Image: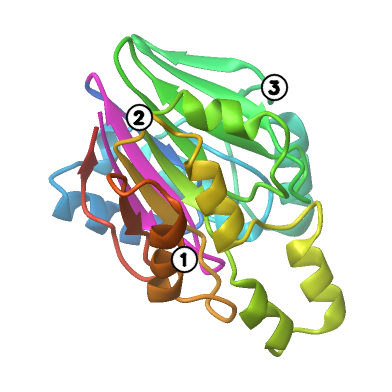
Amino acid sequence: MIAASLQSGSNGNCIYVECDGVGLLFDAGICGAVAARRLAALGRDIRSVRAVIISHDHADHIRYAGVYQRKYGIPLYVTARTLCAAEAKLDLGKLSDIRLFLAGGTLSFGEVSVRTLPTPHDGQDGAVFVVSNRQKSLGILTDLGHVFRELPQVISSLDAVFIESNYDPVLLAKGPYPPALKRRIEGAGGHISNYEAAELLCEGARLQWACLAHLSETNNYPSLALETHRKIVPEGLVVHTASRYSSSGLLSV
């Protein structure tokens, strides 16, 4: 199983996972041409991708979903409530190949399964994902809302994970955001902090690596996120950060 973050952050999100010859994209928050170019740099053809699977309706995760379908012919997997909410506020254009799923169910692509888990993030009907075959499991856990009850058990089942590590509490408290936005970020429907992500990763005895994703541009920075995690997570765990501006490169598990 291999994976790459093509971009991660409030300016656009897209993660590529390939397993048993099946290539999947998670979220469509960057334009199709950029995704195609970054995949090509990794030796992958976007037209070979089997599905674009959407986590929730926020623009940085779904705004280009229609382009991926119309230009590259990739089916769109999305919940009905997420699609309805997105179309109410974004111009996704014509969509002709929509595969609806229920958050909490499992999608199948040959020998590859994608388990979907509902989240308390403040999008409509949000979900996170666990991609598995018979040997390995990889988590895509961003826009979590808060550390909800199922997360430690999910982490313990994974061999690798993309996990949000959105903010540093001190930077958030002292930063320029208005009070209401600060409350939203650290509240039950917002994001989790560097410390919360690191504590979660301590549950992952099987983890080979973790890639910290969805870092805030204002309330975090990669070196701080890495420093926080290295103080908390097991010494042998490899920790990467996903860039807001470029691909992570291929990570294997």
Q: Are marks 1 and 2 in contact (CB under 8 Å)?
A: no
Q: Earlier in the sequence, mark 1 or mark 3?
A: 3
Q: Which mark is residue 191?
A: none
Picture coordinates of residue 76, whole percent (x, y)? 52, 33
According to the image, label 2 marks what residue?
159
Picture coordinates of residue 183, whole percent (x, y)? 83, 69
Q: Amino acid at mark 3?
A: Leu
Task: Classify mark 2: residues with Cα within 10 Å, few (<14), some (14-19) or many (20+).
Answer: many
Q: Is residue 44 above or below residue 215?
A: above
Tell whether 26 sits left or right of 182.
Answer: left
What is the magenta range? 1-20
According to the image, label 3 marks what residue?
102
**Is residue 31 or residue 205 the one in the foreground?**
205
Furthest toward the right, the residue is: 180
Is residue 153 shown in magenta? no
Residue 98 in sight from this viewpoint: no
According to the image, label 1 marks what residue?
228
Residue beneath the point at 48% across and 39% down: 140
Picture coordinates of residue 2, whole percent (x, y)? 24, 35
Tell whether 245 sits left or right of 101.
Answer: left
Q: Amino acid at mark 1?
A: Thr
